[in-house]
Amino acid sequence: MNEILRVENLKKHFTKKGFFGSKSNTVKAADGVSFYLNEGEVFVIAGESGSGKTTIAKLILKSIQLDSGKIFFEQEEIGNEQAKIKKIRMNCQMIHQDPYDSINPRMRIGDIVSEPLEIHKIGNKNERKKRTIDVLHEVKLEPAEEISKKYPHMLSGGQRQRVVLARALSLKPKIIIADEPVSMLDVSIRAEMLELMQELQKKYNISFLYITHDLATARYFGQRIGILYLGKIVETGPINQVLLNPKHPYTQALIDAISEPDPENLYREKKIRINEPSDVDVNQGCRFRARCPYVIEKCVEEPELEEIEDGHYSACHVKLDLT
Ligand SMILES: Nc1ncnc2c1ncn2[C@@H]1O[C@H](COP(=O)(O)OP(=O)(O)O)[C@@H](O)[C@H]1O
Ligand SMILES: [Mg+2]
């Protein structure tokens, strides 16, 4: 399988100014993130809110600057040259969590969908119009001609997110980064949207970076996964191996949080909660140790990702059999 995207050791730290004389602090939104995405594959980045998921997406699309690290698209490093930035932005489209982030309420649907074609000067007016109607059909917004003349407020939330998907598809991207694409939608229409994304992903062999905090949709859609905790991937591998045989206590805690109540799980979850508020310095050693029920002395040293089974890596000093 060909690798289409690779990121190596991405770092992005933000400094938050303290209020009223309190100390400013540094947030390590991305703190050495590495992963790859193969052609036609869905790689999931899963983690809680604030773990750095959106930051990674923005770094890849060069909408924010890296502190350090490398990004490769089709084996070619994407630095700060305009031509390279343009190349990644043409080939890699983003779907935001909130459709309002990416659609202008004062533009007609047709113009919203064709805008990327105009920005990148693809085709003439008629060709752009045809492409716009074609992608509206693709995302099943019917009747497409009629929909193209409407304004965003005339559509439902689910329809608006389809417009966002149509817009992302308009340039025939090789990669789509979908940043929590269904989390703002009504539960009843989430499955539909995911099915549609999966159908189009397969039909056009699009590589997806699927960003979510929801492991159930991750398992439905993804082939491999990286579990992100405070700016670092703590476990990664084929999705079934990671979710059915988790090796990192944090992955286990995430799974417990969604699984059936079971006394054993409750016990483990409680232990993790008890360990939560803490003055442990997460800038050193294992960043999960403040919440980890299995913490040992060695955890003051930062654990690196280690291969446990074929393609399955975990960054944890405690070699637990968690299943
Ligand atoms: N522009 C910014 N300035 C300061 N802090 C930021 C900025 N963007 C993100 N952060 C912080 O970085 C961390 C990761 O944020 P984000 O990537 O949005 O996480 P996620 O998408 O997983 O919820 C959070 O603590 C967030 O507050
Ligand atoms: Mg986010």
Image (cartoon, rainbow, N blue to C red):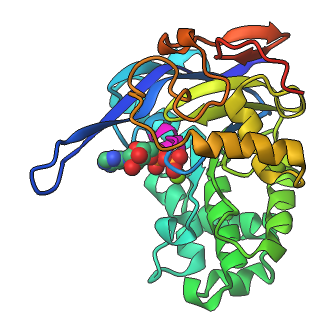
Left or right of 159, for residue 83: left
Residue 70 percent across, percent down from the top left: 45, 18
Left or right of 182, for residue 32: left
Front residue of 152 and 241? 241
Residue 28 percent across, percent down from the top left: 38, 33
- Identify the residue at horizontal 61%, vertical 87% (top origin): 150
Whether residue 262 is in magenta: the answer is no
* Residue 143 in view, yes or no: yes
Residue 3 percent across, percent down from the top left: 70, 19
Q: Quadrant of the C terminus?
A: top right
- Identify the residue at horizontal 73%, vertical 16% (top origin): 313
- Identify the residue at horizontal 60%, vertical 63% (top origin): 128
Q: Quadrant of residue 245?
A: top right
Which range is magenta?
A: 51-58
Relative vertical location of residue 66 with respect to residue 112 in this rendering, above or below = above
Magenta stretch, main secondary structure, is helix
Whether residue 55 is in magenta: the answer is yes
- Identify the residue at horizontal 32%, vertical 26% (top origin): 67
Left or right of 47, for residue 101: left
User: Exactly how many numbered labels are in the figure?
Assistant: 0
Q: Quadrant of the N terminus?
A: top right
Residue 236 percent across, percent down from the top left: 72, 24
* Residue 201 in view, yes or no: no
Q: Quadrant of residue 225?
A: top right
In the rendered image, the residue lying farthest to the bottom is 154
Left or right of 109, for residue 268: right
